[in-house]
Image (tube, rainbow, N blue to C red):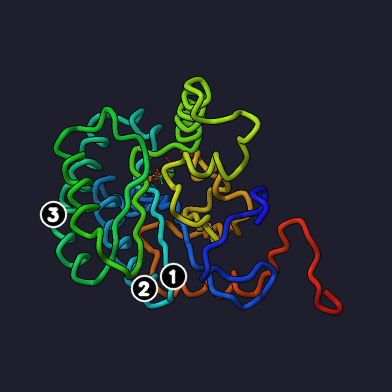
Amino acid sequence: MPTNLPRWTDDAPEPGVPGAPPRHVAIIMDGNGRWAAARGLPRLEGHRRGVEALRRAVRAAHELGVRHLTLYSFSVENWSRPVEEVSDLMNLLRLFIRRDLAELRDSNVRIRVIGERVGLPADILGLLVEAETTTRANTGLTLVVAFNYGGRQELVSAIRRIAEAARDGRLDPSKIDTGVVSDHLDTADIPDPDLVIRTSGELRISNFLLWQSAYAEFAFLPMHWPDFDKKAFEDAVANYQSRQRRYGGRLTRAGA
Ligand code: IPE
Ligand code: IPE
Ligand code: MG
């Protein structure tokens, strides 16, 4: 397969076949703060309800046959928020892993973490590694947690490693292609997202999976993340299934 085409796994939907379900759904979980503000509640309450929505999303993904679910939980830019909010978000991650890890393991969910690990609080790093190792042998839904993640930062670190390999003579620069770049990303063994969902009505990507979403379909939903439920997930998937993905080519069916 030429490496300049989007990468496919064996079970990925064929390009241009309407009706194929998305195998990889990635979600920008946005709007917790506005959800809380609209109800006169503290932001923390919005984030707490956001964790409940996250649990619903994992269950729904499983029921909808999604193989990979990536959740944008904390961006590298989110450190610029007030320290109390950053601390609340870290505490929610701690709570989530402590409370939910056993159930996720028993539900055959495999957890993967993408993002920058250097600079994370030691106990958070320990919990993330524990989540990955505990579920490593699972074969069901892969839950990809994007934590301290930034698409540009991920590309920079890939470029650095590629440059080092070239400098050390392990890689011929003329052999660098899209496949080599993909293989140096945190997502090296994860297929590209088919569908990227963002809640809260914002129409931007906010440094999420910049490389990987080159040919993703997008769904921008007006609801805030704490209101996201199975029905919203089903509707987004149904909408996705009605689209034609062309990857710059043309469909071969008559009339297409
Ligand atoms: C998403 O909700 C959670 C994170 C970014 C961690 P926000 O906290 O961004 O909520 P809004 O966008 O301010 O409403
Ligand atoms: C994106 O939401 C990051 C996460 C959902 C973790 P933000 O709320 O941080 O994005 P901006 O600031 O609106 O672009
Ligand atoms: Mg936001």
Other residues around mark 2 within 10 Å, as few (<14) / some (14–19) / many (≥20):
some
Other residues around mark 3 within 10 Å, as few (<14) / some (14–19) / many (≥20):
few
Mark identifier at residue 66: 1
Proximity of marks 1 and 2: CB atoms separated by less than 8 Å: yes
Mark identifier at residue 98: 3
In the depicted structure, whether residue 254 falls above or below residue 131: below
Q: Position of residue 241 (x, y in %)?
A: 60, 74
CA separation in Å, label 1 and label 2: 6 Å
CA separation in Å, label 1 and label 3: 25 Å
Mark identifier at residue 62: 2
Quick one: quadrant of the N terminus? bottom right
In the depicted structure, whether residue 75 falls above or below residue 96: above
Indicate the secondary structure of the residue bearing disc 2: helix
- Name the residue: 54% across, 44% down: 205
Q: Does label 3 or label 2 sit earlier along the sequence?
A: 2
The count of marks equals: 3
Q: Position of residue 155 (x, y in %)?
A: 50, 34
Q: What residue type is labelled 2?
A: His
Inspect this view and state whether residue 19 appears.
yes
Q: Which amino acid does label 1 sit on?
A: Val
Please identify the quarter of the rendering in which residue 142 is found: bottom left
Please identify the quarter of the rendering in which residue 194 is found: bottom right
Indicate the secondary structure of the residue bearing disc 1: loop
Q: Which of 180 and 114 is in front in this view?
A: 180
Q: Does label 1 or label 3 sit earlier along the sequence?
A: 1
Please identify the quarter of the rendering in which residue 161 is found: top left
